[in-house]
Amino acid sequence: MRVKGKRDSHTPMTLVTQISKCTLCADRFAQTATRHRPRPVPWFQAGTPIMVAGQAPGMRVHEVGKPFWDRSGDRLRNWMGVTRDQFYNRALVSVLPTAFCFPGYNARGADLPPPRICWDTWHEQVLAQMGPPKISLIIGKYAIERHLGLRGALRDIVADWRAHPPGVFVLPHPSWRNNGWLRKNPWFETELVPALQATIRETIASATTDTAENG
Ligand code: SF4
C-alpha cells in the first residue's frame, strides 16, 4: 500500500531527480583548482516549445543552481525578448547544456570543456523526454557540434542562419568575452536577433493560447 506523502520505494526516480543526484564527474572535478563537488543543474520538462542548448553552467550558476542566473543570462534574455518569468517557466523554456555541471577552470581562468560523459550518459534520454522543440537556440561550439554535427568557424555558422532548419538559431555565447565578436558582427544584433525575437514571440503566444484553450 502506498503511504500518502511518501514516495513508493518502487516508484522510479524522475529523470530530473536522477540527473540531480549524478556524481559521475566527482573525481574529475576534485582535481580542478576549485575542487568542487558536482552540482547538476537540470532544467527541462516534456513538451517545452523552446530549448536553449548551451555549454555548461559557470561558477555563478553552480552556486545558485539556476541556469543563466548571471549577466550572460541577462543578455541572452534580451536577445530572446523574454522576461525572467518567461525564461524560468519550464512550460516555455528548457535549458539543456552539453554538461549539467560546472566543469572548473583551465589555467587561463576560462571554463574547462563540458565533460563528454555527461552528454553520453544523459542527453539521449533528456531529448526523448522533452520531445522536439519548436525553437532551438544552439549556443557555442560544443552545442553546435553535438546538436547539429557542425564544426568550423563560429562566425560562419552563425552568419549562415537563414540556411539552418526552421526554428534553429545558432548563437555565440552571450558572455562579455564575446563583446568584441558582437562589435565585429553588427548584423547579428540588427538582423538575426529581431528574427529570433519575432519567432519566440509567436511561439509563446501560441503556447499561451493552447494552455488557455486546454485549461
Ligand atoms: S557533468 Fe553530468 S555526468 Fe558529470 S557529474 Fe554532472 S551530471 Fe553527472
Image: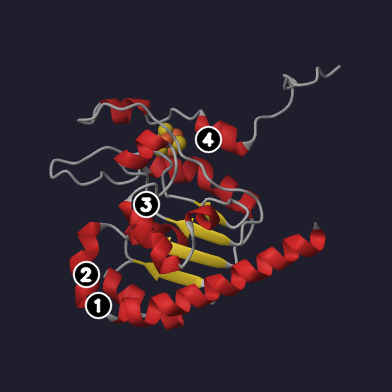
Which residue is drawn at the image coordinates 60% and 70% (left, top)?
A: 203
For the N terminus, the image quarter is top right
**What's the distance in space between the residues labelled 3 and 1, CA to CA?**
22 Å
Q: Is residue 201 left or right of residue 53?
A: right
Mark 4 or 3, nearer chain start = 4
**Among the two numbered marks 3 and 1 on one chain, the one whose residue lies closer to the N terminus:** 3
Secondary structure beneath label 4 = helix
The residue where tag 4 is placed is 19
Q: Is mark 4 within 8 Å of ligand 1?
A: yes
Give the amino acid type for the residue marked by disc 2 in the picture.
Answer: Trp
Badge 4, how many Cα within 10 Å: few under 14, some, many 20+? some
Dot 4 amino acid type: Ile
- Report if the CB atoms under discs 2 and 1 are less than 8 Å apart: yes
**Disc 1 marks which residue?**
185
Q: Earlier in the sequence, mark 4 or mark 1?
A: 4
* Amino acid at pointer 3: Gln
Seen in the image, is 1 located left or right of residue 189?
Answer: right
Q: Nearer the viewer, mark 4 or mark 1?
A: 1
